[in-house]
Structure formats: C-alpha cells, structure tokens
Image: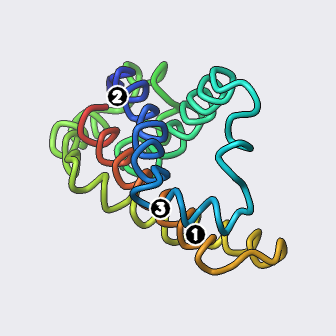
Amino acid sequence: MEMNFLAFFASALTTLVTGFIWYNPKVFGTIWMREAGVTQEDLQKGSMLKIFVLTYIFSLMMTIIVSGLTIHQSGAVGMVGGPPMIESAKPSFAAFMADYGTAFRTFKHGALHGFMTGLFFAFPMLAINGLFERKSWKYIFVHAGYWILTLTIMGGIICAWA
C-alpha cells in the first residue's frame, strides 16, 4: 500500500486554514476571546511565525494517527509486518488487497472517522481540561467545534488521497 505523503502535508494545513476562519472575530473569535479572557493586544504578543510553524509540525504529527484511524488497510499491512514485508507476504494478503485495497478510501469515509475522532476523543479531552480550568461551556464548545471540524476535514483528505 503506497502512501501519498502529499495528503499528510495538505491535511496538516487544515488546522491553520480552519483556525483562520473559525477563530475570526466574525465567526467565533469574539466569543473565544471573551471566554478565554484575552484581548486583541494579548494576541499581538509572541512570534506568530513560531506559532504557525509549530502548529504545522504538531498537525503533521496528528496526521499519522488520523491516517491509522481512517485507512483500514493499514491494519492489514501491519499484520504482515509493515511495508517492508509486503513482498514476502502470503498470497492471501495479495488477494485481500486486490479485493479490498481501495475499499472505503473516500473523502466521505475519512470525514466520518475524523468526525468520530473529534467527537469521541478531542471533545472529551477539551471538556475535561475546561472543567478543571473552570472554563465555560461556551469556551469548551468553541474549541471542540473547531477540532471536530478540523479532524473531519483532515480525515477526509487523508483517506481520499493517501
């Protein structure tokens, strides 16, 4: 199973693109700033280049896990010992991959798994942190909505392209 690494690099951009839109003051930015207790002046502090570069690097790290959650054939490849062992795998593996190697490799399928990852993994983590930090439910839902949307798009891109 060949991986298209362009899919990983492209899907990692979704955290930045979605964030530019989601946290824009005309969308949820004003609510987020009020609930987080930050001002426009606070946001001007620090190196935006550093923030964007680190965000992209962390997003690339996330794509590795998201690919495992959206591309089911990676489990079959793992069963034979990973990509280096594909050539020496039993004929049943080749038959399986011939029949199912591209099954469920659509944007829609990846988006479904990305959505479920956001809803059942990211949202609970954010809610737990928000509860202990005494943040409002608005704050939690703004962040959770962002991650659910971002992981949905990320999962769709990875599953369709990788």
Query: With respect to residue 133, does 71 lie above or below?
Result: above
Image quadrant for the N terminus? top left
Residue 72 drawn at (x, y percent) = 36, 49
Q: Residues within 10 Å of mark 2 (few under 14, many from 20)?
A: many
Q: CA distance from mark 2 to mark 3?
A: 28 Å
Image quadrant for the C terminus? top left
Numbered label attached to residue 7: 2
Residue at figure coordinates x 61%, y 27% from the top left: 57
Task: Indicate which disc, 1 or 3, sits on the residue closer to the N terminus.
Answer: 3
Mark in front: 1 vs 3: 3
Q: Secondary structure at mark 3?
A: helix
Numbered label attached to residue 123: 1
Image quadrant of residue 56? top right
Q: Residues within 10 Å of mark 1 (few under 14, many from 20)?
A: many
Q: CA distance from mark 1 to mark 3?
A: 17 Å
Residue at figure coordinates x 48%, y 19% from the top left: 84
Mark in front: 2 vs 1: 1
Residue 58 drawn at (x, y percent) = 63, 34
